[in-house]
Amino acid sequence: MAKPETPRKATKTPAKAQTPKPIGLEPKKTGRPSKYTPEIAQEMCNLLADGVPLREICRKEGFPAWQTVYDWMVRDDQAVASGGGVGLSIAIARAREIGQDAIAEQIWLDMIAEPERILSEGGGRVDSGYVQWQKAKAEIGLKLLAKWNPKRYGDRVQLAGDSESPLKVEVESQAEQMMAALLQNIELKRQDGSR
């Protein structure tokens, strides 16, 4: 005999209705969109060439955070490596080098031209506190330049050779010295005997 069919129990929660996704819309990316434009990059390079530090530039209105700039540099270098051209990091490095020259010029102006102006306008007297302050500013600037670009602005102290001027070591042993002295004595005796 066949079993009678038992009716199914109704579920307590209704099934969720699936809403169709509109065609052509992808999920939104998280984070803010990149503000990178060649104009912003050029303006940053111009300010760096004037001696303004990158972090100070990034604090200005309309510029990205400094971390974003470094992200741009990495992304741009990867794109340049695959396609050629000059990357953002190369442009920024060149602008920083020009900016170091601008900083050196400013140090010179602060140490030479500014005191001369004060002397001519101020009756021939410069406050000693002002002189010490200017001297400290100049020393800090020169130390920073020496750290940023030691080949150009650092002190030239060479303890070991490099590719441009290799270190030469000449070793003369005691035996070689004795042999040279013996040969010199023989030569002197030979010259005495020929007279």
Image (spheres, rainbow, N blue to C red):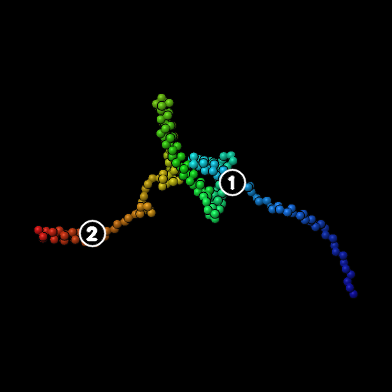
Q: Secondary structure at mark 1?
A: loop
Q: How many residues crowd mark 1 within 10 Å: few (<14), some (14–19), many (20+)? A: few
Residue at the farthest left position: 195
Left or right, 91 with reference to 16: left
Q: Quadrant of the N terminus?
A: bottom right
| Residue at the far top in the pictured view | 123
Q: Residue at x 52, y 43 (%)?
A: 45
Do the numbered discs 1 and 2 sit on residues whose CB atoms are within 8 Å?
no
* Residue pointed to by mark 2: 177
78 in relation to 112, above or below: below
Quadrant where the image shows the C terminus? bottom left
Identify the disc placed on residue 36: 1
Return the x and y of residue 50 as percentages of the image width and height: 49, 39
Quadrant of the image occupied by residue 42: top right
Image height of 44 relative to 23, above or below: above
The image shows residue 1, relative to residue 193, as above or below, that is below
For the point 57% across and 43% down, which residue is it? 39
Picture coordinates of residue 4, whole percent (x, y): 89, 70
| Number of marks present in the image shown | 2
Could one spot residue 166 in this view of the protein?
Answer: yes
Left or right: 134 with respect to 11?
left
Q: Position of residue 109 (x, y in %)?
A: 43, 35
Which amino acid is tagged 2?
A: Gln
